[in-house]
Image (spheres, helix red, strand yellow):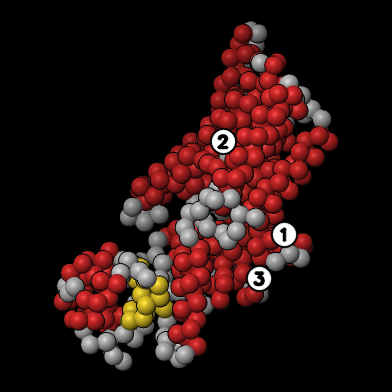
Amino acid sequence: MRYSATRNDGNVLHQFASVIILTLLLWLVYTFSGELSFANSYTTLSNLKSYTESGKFISPSEPLPVVILYYWKHVTGLNYLTAFHLFVALLFSLVIHLVFSLLQQSKWKMNQYFSLFLIATIPYFYEIPFVMFNELVVVFVFALLMKIAKEWNLVSFFGIFLLAYISINSALLAGIFFVSAYFIFLTVKKGREQRMKTTVFFKKKDIPGMMLIAYFIFLVVLLIWAVKSDFFGVSGFSFVVSRYFFLLRYLLPLVLAMALVSFLFNEEKELNGSISTAIIIVLAAVCVYYDTRKKEFNPDELHGLKKQVDALRASGKISSRLIYGDSLHRDFMYFHTSLLVQTRGIPDKRDFLIVPGIWKADRKEIDNNYKIDSYYQYYQLDNRTVLMNRVLFDRIIKNNSPAAVAFLLKERMYNKNEKETAYELYLKKLDGDFAKN
């Protein structure tokens, strides 16, 4: 079961140069795209900041990607954003080149390098390093293992098992599942080729192949057990399925695009000409233009919200109270101000909750129905978001008045009494293991 026996790595120097050039290109695009506008990136950055300053994580998270990013920042000496942009650019560039090297076993053609640049800048793929940073770290490890491992052995097996232990989540399990399926596909394909040569595929000493199949079965059983035991919560099945398809939603089109590039440029010789090169470069430039305008949310709104919260705290109106919000509020606020917004727990009656979706007409109804004073309090943060204390929050729900606002508040409940899942407790344990003393 030697998967690299026929592999031609081509010009390693050219591939290395391509990785560096694409890294710098992506870094420039990320840098000049303005403020980060992907929620998952702020989760990573807030945990990176917390780990750097206090040695702990502010939210349960897979520690391995953040710890790697911490040492990257420490070695490079860059600030948080620059270090993050450069690291994700390098990571994405490495993943693209590693995966393509698995698909393209013959020497790479020049336009294939340019095509990889085009793929990396396609707006749909542009957001991959930001929305699935943790998963991309794991994909890189797998791609590297598939690239350098000449055969599956005990070291490979237990290496992946350790990686699964450190970075376990449903997406990682799906990723291991996917990679295992890929290796089994290669095994079956090689078996057919060997049978055509009148050789026997499953020999008694084919231990790596049997281990791989056993590991594949183990992962299936583990996923079933995790769902059945509510490891990911009472909605564990939908959680696993959604994370699995989230992974496939991005990685499958990415791999298919690279497979198409490999096939077309090997079969259609005219695609290797200078005209094709010019077309690819123009398409990449157009993609970069749209990349710089791609936003998951408007960061200016959160900056305005942060500014209002800072002003209220400075004035002493809410300085001694806790603030509750969703995970984006927590991560954005902590990264920019070190203010820790709560997402769990039962707020005191004087604590405040960030409530989006309260428009001017809604605020007018609240003013008409309740006496806003030192007991019932709310503060406008922007034209559709308010900071409301729990007393007023609960009273509106109890009285169902205004009805539209009460309905919105019920929808916006932050699950403060929700019990932590076994998965979250496991992440907390891992975070504690990786915490700096």
Residue 250, percent from left and from top: 51, 40
- Position in image of residue 62 (x %, y %): 55, 58
Front residue of 82/273: it is 273
Whether label 3 touches label 2, CB < 8 Å: no
Is 196 displayed left or right of 315 in the figure? Answer: right
In the image, residue 261 above or below residue 269: below
Q: Which residue is mark 2?
A: 254
Q: How many C-alpha atoms fall within 10 Å of the one at disc 2: few (<14), some, or many (≥20)?
A: some
Between the C-alphas of marks 1 and 2, the distance is: 26 Å
Nearest to N terminus: mark 1 or mark 2: 1
- Above or below, 390 against 208 in this view is below
Number of the front mark, 3 or 2: 2
Q: Residues within 10 Å of mark 3 (few under 14, many from 20)?
A: some
| Residue found 40% across the figure and 75% down from its top | 381
Looking at the picture, which amino acid does disc 3 mark?
Answer: Thr
Q: Give the residue displayed 50% in from the left and 81% down from the top.
A: 310
Q: Are there few (<14), some (14-19), or many (20+) residues within 10 Å of tag 1?
A: some
Label 1: which residue?
72
Q: Which residue is mark 3?
A: 52
